[in-house]
């Protein structure tokens, strides 16, 4: 949900934008490295499809 | 291959491959203990479907003996089957195993059905591959019979048997019923690694889709018709008893249905969690605190320090340590402390239970289905076979779900109701009623010769014995094998080497396994102390370790790799430092370098972490990288802020505001390199957390010159 909100307000986030935008979500299993990549991928996919 | 032959010989002494017709049609293949000619009995209404089921449509279901708590077992174990069965992962699904030690016991943990100790791959690498290979051979035999030709002519590809000579192809699904009638092959041939198509690849996780679209079922997601939700408050002081509560006020809260009373806790049962929570607040329970009412962390530490002054049970004694220490031109000694730590699985403790005159049905996420089954049977005074456990995905295990306290509690609450009850702990309850990684107090000393080589090593480890409670049979002559794990098989040349363990229990405080188990405490002590010795020898810490691992090539190699990866030795800004740590545990070698900056106010930031890991045969390299990343983040959290403190007999921390977790914007860049290896697979879930902690503390020393010997990091001591 945080990622969706981030991408709606900022469709081309930098790495720092992603980190700050997602800082409210805690992951105890430590998948942050992958969350960063996933949000970046989503941003790229969205820009391609123009949604 | 010599390695496989050794593993196979060991396996064949213990277990027997069996196969037969699956309920509803199809073929099943599985394992039963050797010497047991009877069909596997499972004590459940579940059919004997063992490990692998192939149905008439060719769909393969792997019933995983080990549970999934995010560490990737539900993908890696099916990968092992799929490789030797020769099917594509897209036709494979995975299912939870029911409680059954005989079918699903883990040889690495005494034969019980327990997921932990980084043993899933180590215990099941061979059995899963052999089950896949056996099924494949039976399917080929069935095809050969069907076609009236010699089986030697046939090959397989992606779930199909092929006769290249005639071009005939038969899908597995069309062969399963015939195959099920055949005898299981006595000896199965496994694929040569040069032909691997699945093992060693980053195969897509089978559990991801469900976890993204919300269909994945964790224990907390269980929805049983007629179920009510409860939340509970147990005595905040360990060992205290429930004294009183305001029943009327609780029942007056809308949607609250019932109050259940236990010895040490009160539960409010309602239509939904929020009502239960409000009901509990209205109940204002009061407790008789009992004997531990005034316990503080300082009390615990004082007792440990006192115990550490006395000799312990000897876990290792090579050479003559006292003499060598005496003679050594340079000596160092130190006291290191590991604090209490909480698990904080993101999914708080929960369990759904339904107790009826016929028995008990439980929905939960657990690392110990059979142990839980036994504990519930005992608590209710019924036969174990009358307890049904439905396992789920785990929203974090980390060792917390190796325990059954919250399961028995839920059952005792459900016993007071007709309907099923889902008991969910609040985050506060979860943190304050954890079973903690115990406080450990270590005295360590060593002697160096004139050339800076270690000539004597003396390590006394003091703390609670988890094993004495969890598995008393594992204790030997007063030594808890977990307490000394990671301390008695160091990959360093230590000519005189002594390790002792002294058991000292904190009054009333429950202790349990925490990710990394023994090695996670020992790595902090040992790898920090190695740096102290390097300084005493006037040697670079990396160089010091390289010199002491000349006899252990796999350890030496991961050090060389991480040295390269991290740019060790290149200049850094002021108050920035690199720290290294080496770990050999769970049959895996790893070396970490952490690069850390310390601000003028003492705040520590971990900028980059480099990991070189040699875990033998890498089944799913992406999972290994994920576990390293995960372990690093888990470990950094502990290093920076991990500390459970006790005041007036109760845990002071309660939620993520005062028990802080690393956030994404605090997470370093993490680089992982997996060493290519054909050695037997090692474990990966536990060790990743252990090595990063001392790497961080060593980096802090490099950055500031301050040697911290106690977790968590105290910024006040690092101020400019």
Image: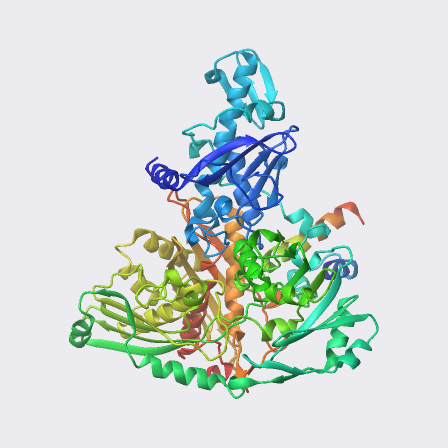
Residue at the spot 29% in from the left edge and 58% down from the top edge:
B549
Point out the residue furthest to the right here.
B254
Where does the image place residue B298, in percent across and percent down from the top left? 46, 86
Residue B527 vertical position relative to residue B685 in the rendered view, above or below: below
Residue at the spot 56% in from the left edge and 56% down from the top edge:
B373
In this view of the protein, can residue A13 be seen by the observer?
yes
Viewer-side residue, B583 vs B257? B257
In the displayed structure, does residue B182 sit left or right of residue B708? right
In this view of the protein, can residue B606 be seen by the observer?
no
Display colour scheme: rainbow
Residue at the spot 34% in from the left edge and 70% down from the top edge:
B531
Q: Tally the numbered discs.
A: 0
In the displayed structure, does residue B648 sit left or right of residue B458? right
Residue B439 vertical position relative to residue B548 in the rendered view, above or below: below
Viewer-side residue, B584 vs B237? B237
Where does the image place residue B304, in percent across and percent down from the top left? 39, 80
Viewer-side residue, B578 vs B284? B284
Residue B50 vertical position relative to residue B667 in the rendered view, above or below: above
Image-quadrant location for residue B220: bottom right
In the displayed structure, does residue A23 sit left or right of residue B628? right
Where does the image place residue B215, in percent across and percent down from the top left? 72, 50
Residue at the spot 62% in from the left edge and 59% down from the top edge:
B395
Viewer-side residue, B204 vs B384? B384
Residue B716 vertical position relative to residue B518 in the rendered view, above or below: below
Where does the image place residue B116, in percent across and percent down from the top left? 49, 56
Q: Quadrant of the N terminus of chain B?
A: top left
């Amino acid at each position: 949900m945080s990622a969706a909100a981030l991408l709606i307000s900022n469709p081309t986030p930098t790495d720092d934008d992603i980190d700050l935008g997602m800082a409210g979500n805690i992951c105890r299993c430590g998948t942050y490295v992958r969350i960063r990549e996933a949000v970046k991928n989503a941003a790229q996919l969205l820009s391609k499809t123009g949604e | 291959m010599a390695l496989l032959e050794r593993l196979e010989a060991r396996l064949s002494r213990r277990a027997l491959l069996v196969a037969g017709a699956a309920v509803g049609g199809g073929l099943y293949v599985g394992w039963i203990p050797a010497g047991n000619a009877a069909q596997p009995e499972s004590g459940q209404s579940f059919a004997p479907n063992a490990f692998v089921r192939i149905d008439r449509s060719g769909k393969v279901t792997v019933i995983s003996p080990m549970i999934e708590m995010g560490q990737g077992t539900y993908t890696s174990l099916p990968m092992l089957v799929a490789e030797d069965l020769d099917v594509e992962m897209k036709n494979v699904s995975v299912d939870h195993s029911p409680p059954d030690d005989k079918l699903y016991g883990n040889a690495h943990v005494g034969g019980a059905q327990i997921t932990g100790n980084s043993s899933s791959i180590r215990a099941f690498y061979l059995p899963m591959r052999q089950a896949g290979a056996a099924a494949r051979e039976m399917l080929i035999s069935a095809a050969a019979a069907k076609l009236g030709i010699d089986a030697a002519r046939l090959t397989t590809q992606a779930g199909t048997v092929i006769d290249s000579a005639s071009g005939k192809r038969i899908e597995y699904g069309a062969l399963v019923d015939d195959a099920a009638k055949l005898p299981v092959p006595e000896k199965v041939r496994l694929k040569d690694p040069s032909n691997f198509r699945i093992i060693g690849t980053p195969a897509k996780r089978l559990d991801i889709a469900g976890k993204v679209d919300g269909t994945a079922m964790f224990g907390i997601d269980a929805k049983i018709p007629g179920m009510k939700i409860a939340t509970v408050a147990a005595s905040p002081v360990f060992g205290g008893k429930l004294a009183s509560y305001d029943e009327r006020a609780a029942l007056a809260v809308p949607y609250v249905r019932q109050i259940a009373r236990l010895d040490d806790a009160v539960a409010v049962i309602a239509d939904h969690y929020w009502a239960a929570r409000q009901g509990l607040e209205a109940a204002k329970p009061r407790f008789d605190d009992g004997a531990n009412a005034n316990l503080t962390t300082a009390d615990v530490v004082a007792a440990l320090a006192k115990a550490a002054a006395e000799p312990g049970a000897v876990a290792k004694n090579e050479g003559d340590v006292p003499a060598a220490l005496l003679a050594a031109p340079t000596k160092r000694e130190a006291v290191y402390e590991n604090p209490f730590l909480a698990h904080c699985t993101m999914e708080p403790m929960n369990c759904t239970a339904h107790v009826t005159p016929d028995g008990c049905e439980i929905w939960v996420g657990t690392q110990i289905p059979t142990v839980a089954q036994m504990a519930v049977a005992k608590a209710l005074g019924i036969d174990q076979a009358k307890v049904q456990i439905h396992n789920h995905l785990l929203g974090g295990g980390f060792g917390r779900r190796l325990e059954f306290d919250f399961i028995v509690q839920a059952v005792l609450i459900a016993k007071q109701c007709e309907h099923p009850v889902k008991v969910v702990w609040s985050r506060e309850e979860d943190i304050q009623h954890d079973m903690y990684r115990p406080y450990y107090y270590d005295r360590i000393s060593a002697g160096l010769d004139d050339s800076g080589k270690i000539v004597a090593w003396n390590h006394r480890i003091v703390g609670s014995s988890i094993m004495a409670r969890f598995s008393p049979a594992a204790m030997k002559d007063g030594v808890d094998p977990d307490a000394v794990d990671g301390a008695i098989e160091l990959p360093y040349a230590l000519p005189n080497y002594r390790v002792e363990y002294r058991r000292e229990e904190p009054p009333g405080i429950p202790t349990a396994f925490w990710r990394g188990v023994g090695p996670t405490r020992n790595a902090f002590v040992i790898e920090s102390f190695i740096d102290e010795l390097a300084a005493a020898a006037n040697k670079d810490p990396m160089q010091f370790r390289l010199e002491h691992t000349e006899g252990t090539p796999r350890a030496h190699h991961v050090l060389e790799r991480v040295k390269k990866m991290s740019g060790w030795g290149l200049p850094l800004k002021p108050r920035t430092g690199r720290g290294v740590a080496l770990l050999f545990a769970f049959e895996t070698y790893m070396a970490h370098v952490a690069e850390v900056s310390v601000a003028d106010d003492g705040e520590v930031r971990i900028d980059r972490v480099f990991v070189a890991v040699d875990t033998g045969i890498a089944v799913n390299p992406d999972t290994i990288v994920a576990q390293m990343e995960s372990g690093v983040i888990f470990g950094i959290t502990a290093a920076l802020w991990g500390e459970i403190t006790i005041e007036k007999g109760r845990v002071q921390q309660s939620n993520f505001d005062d028990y802080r977790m690393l956030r994404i914007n605090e997470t370093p860049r993490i680089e992982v390199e997996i060493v290519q290896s054909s050695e037997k697979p090692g474990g990966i879930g536990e060790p990743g957390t252990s090595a990063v902690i001392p790497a961080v503390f060593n980096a802090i020393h490099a950055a500031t010159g301050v040697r911290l010997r106690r977790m968590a990091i105290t910024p006040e001591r690092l101020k400019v």
